[in-house]
Image: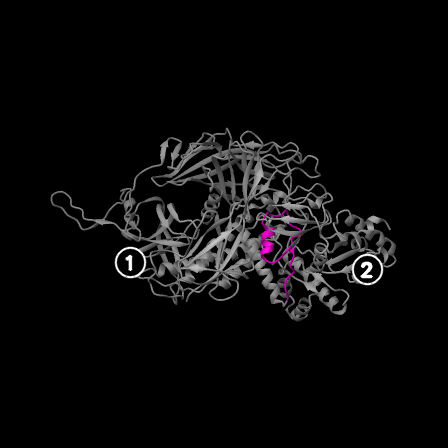
Amino acid sequence: MSEAIRKINKMYILSHTHWDREWYQDFQGFRLRLVHMMDELIEHMERDDEYRYFMLDGQTIMLDDYMAIRPERRDRLAKLIADGRIRIGPWYVMPDEFLVSGESLIRNLLKGIRDSRKWGAEPVRSGYVTDIFGHNSQLPQLLQGFGIDHAMLFRGFHGDGDPSELWWEGADGSRVLGLKLDEDRSYSDFYFAVRWPFFDRDDDYAGHTEELIQRANRLLAFKNERATTDIAIGMDGVDHVEIEPQLAGLLRTLSEGTGVEFVHATIEQYVVDLRKKVQDLRVHKGEQRALGYSGINNWVPENVLSSRIHLKQHNQHGENLLEKWAEPLGVLTAAAGKPYPAGFLTEAWAHLLQNHPHDSICGCSIDQVHRDMIYRFDQARLIGDGLVKESVQYIVDHLDEGRVDGKQVLAVFNMSQSAVDGIVQVELALPVGSDASVRMAEHNLQGTSFKIFDGDRREIAYQVLSVQRGHTEMYRPYRELPRGRISDVYRLALHAAVPPFGYAAYTVEPFELDWHGPLEYSAPKLVAPVRHPGSQQIRARTWDTGRVRVEVQPDGTIDITESETGHTFRGLLRFEDEGDIGDGWTHMAPIANERFTSAGSPAQLSIVYDGPYATCLRICTLMRLPRGIDTSGMRRSEEWTDYPVTTFVTLLRGDPKVYCRTVVDNTVRDHRFGVWFPTGLDTDSYAASTPFDLVKRPLRQPDQSGYLRKPYEAFPHNGILAANDGKAGIAIFSKGLYEVCLREDDNRALGLTLFRSTAKEVGTDPGDGGQQLRTMTFEYAIEAGRVDDDYESGLWLTHQRYVAGIRTGERPAGRVWRQSPYRREANLPLTASFLSIEGAGLQISALKAAEEGENRWIVRLFNTTDREASGRLICRRELDEVHLLNLNEEPLQKLDTLRGEIAVKAGPRQIVTIGFCWKV
């Protein structure tokens, strides 16, 4: 036996199955296989004590799926779990790391750990992310926050003889021990090296001892080249595979034949032994998205960031709805006496998390899978919307009746940590036929007939943007049958002042005056016109908000001049299109990849509305594109079609953001379509947000021509894309867009892929859903500004405000029809804030109830900067006890509080969780 083979003297064999819940089969098809696999596992482990351990892929949802079909086997399964033989958790589902929010990753682990404990066992304490398309920079901190000190990793590394052990250091400095898997066989190295070659032989392993030993020795030699100690782990499993009943005897044969001890084990047993042996290891810092030098499976398929983009949009909407509205509003209304809707939120999160496995959210599965995802997104949305509406109505219905005095109420809610103090757009429903309806328009008086007052009786000027006549809405008074309400719905722009995590209520009142005509003719009080004239237009194609000046060019691109620095960004909003013969995983350009740009093409400009507070422009660009790829697959087709692209640009007085909404009716196949923003800045880097981090990346990529796969052309982000030269900066905020593209030219352009149209991803799929032949809408905003020390932390605040927006609640004049069972005295103030934070760089990511206990609440925040940040959390209710918690919501330290204030400190990029109770 060679010295190379003698280096490893013990191999821990981890039996498992990698279970994509849905992928090349639909969920029900895979569950049929899951039930058969689990049936055999339970029966075999009960009769064979030598088959010691089996791991359920690090995710507990497999247990739920099995129990739905086999509830009668719960006790048998529970015993094997409690005995530590079937290993479960820590995840609820194994998620993608870039296409979901940081909070989603935390909620996933919170649920997986608690689901494990319901089975009478502690979860596997492993960062088990074996099949993920790259790793974000904050995962080490997230894992450590749950008491997990190591991670099993695959993609995202060089992939040519990487050491099998390494240190992975996160953005905040947290470290976990990285267990780097085989760069090609990944979580299946033992399976492919030893088991798989024999699967179709009638005699299984009998009579093949010599071949078995040869194969095991080749595996050991491969491991020796990568191991940093004298032990190794072998992964006995693959996608959706059943157990090997003969494993115990097989391991004995290998031990005897190789002289190396092969032992059936758990990850934890292996790591305990490994930690005694590791010495100096290579340190990998930050996000891990290396191209993958060799090994096809080791590639990071970066273009999943833009596949089936509607799924990403649905997901981000659901995350924002739960994180930024349903949960914080639930806490706010609980402080006002309404029970917190914990059960509903748990259900909504479960639906949302079930869409987060990589083959689901990445958009690279069969059509049926992605149709099923829409149902789950809908359920999360319907629950979340219902909870938000109920909470908003609870506040509105219990405002101080003495101050409202029977008037119509419009309340504006803000669940971000920044106060709203500027122009917002709201909808106001006025009863049809009332004095405050559209009678002014009927009499051609060009005005309205109502005034709006804040809580201090100051009149609030407004601009009418549109009116919808005769809108019918159903509502149901409590203990009554549903009723209908017909209204004229006004869309208004007005200046609102709303505190953080709070609301501000306004009264809406008809405006009347005495009118006396000639010859002593007099009339009773009449509804009078209310007018607020003005415009933001300063030239035929130029508008000025007071913060930015926007000029629309003949080709539909826009120039933005920022007032403070005077810097102008030119040629923004340029659309580009190219061919795509790839699939859901990878963009692949045809050899003759004719690209098209909207630059230089004539565009039509119209003004949807313009006034003193808001302007909306419609820019219609007509491109001509090939209908698809020609039959050779080498070039785009010679059949052409008109391809209209409509972008609505909204400008608000005093607001530096330029709000864009692009609508595309996609009738073209096999292409990638994006929007570009030339920065023209003298910089060699840009910044992109990922979960809990703003990652700096170079604009110019290293030479990757020698790699097996094509060079990177796309990079992840989750809503903030920015560049600056130290003086002037530009940021693009987006909703549900994740793929960044770069141009290494003098313009230093940043691009957002809006969508890709691709052929079927999986050979078993007859569907056409990847082509995205539908009408799609994309929302993003552009902000130019001056760069200072707080520039990057300001980007987070702006992004939070942008994606959260505002919500409104209304109460008609007169009698209040209670619409829920929850009642309290109607004495809530017209303006209130539940929580605020002081201190630059501290960003709140969660305000919710604790996972366990009554009157226990959670605030989570993170430091957006590379320096220590400190500040104060200010709660408007007196607090009883406050603790610093880990991410699993377990106490680390008691904190002092004085009159509802909590001093907060966070290290660079650190995530901090605070738990509190309020006095009752």
Using the rendered image of the protein, determine whether residue 76 is visible from the camera's viewpoint.
yes
Residue 786 counted in the magenta span: no
Q: Is 138 inside the magenta-drawn segment? A: yes
Please give left or right for residue 558 compared with residue 185 in the image.
left
Residue 380: % across, % down? 52, 57
Callout 2 secondary element: helix
Query: Dot 1 corresponds to which residue?
Result: 403
- Residue 573 versus residue 729: which sits nearer the camera? 729
The percent position of residue 433, horizontal first and vertical second, equals: 29, 53
Left or right of residue 709: residue 789: left
**Residue 375 position in % (x across, y down):** 55, 55
Residue type, label 2: Leu
User: Residue 52's image quarter?
Assistant: bottom right
Q: Quadrant of the C terminus?
A: bottom left
Which three-letter amino acid code belongs to the residue tagged 1? Arg
Q: Is residue 377 above or below residue 702?
A: below
Q: Which residue is mark 2?
A: 250
Residue range highlighted in magenta:
121-149
The crowd level at tag 1 (other Cα within 10 Å; few <14, some 14-19, many 20+) is some
Coordinates of residue 736 in the picture (x, y in percent): 52, 46
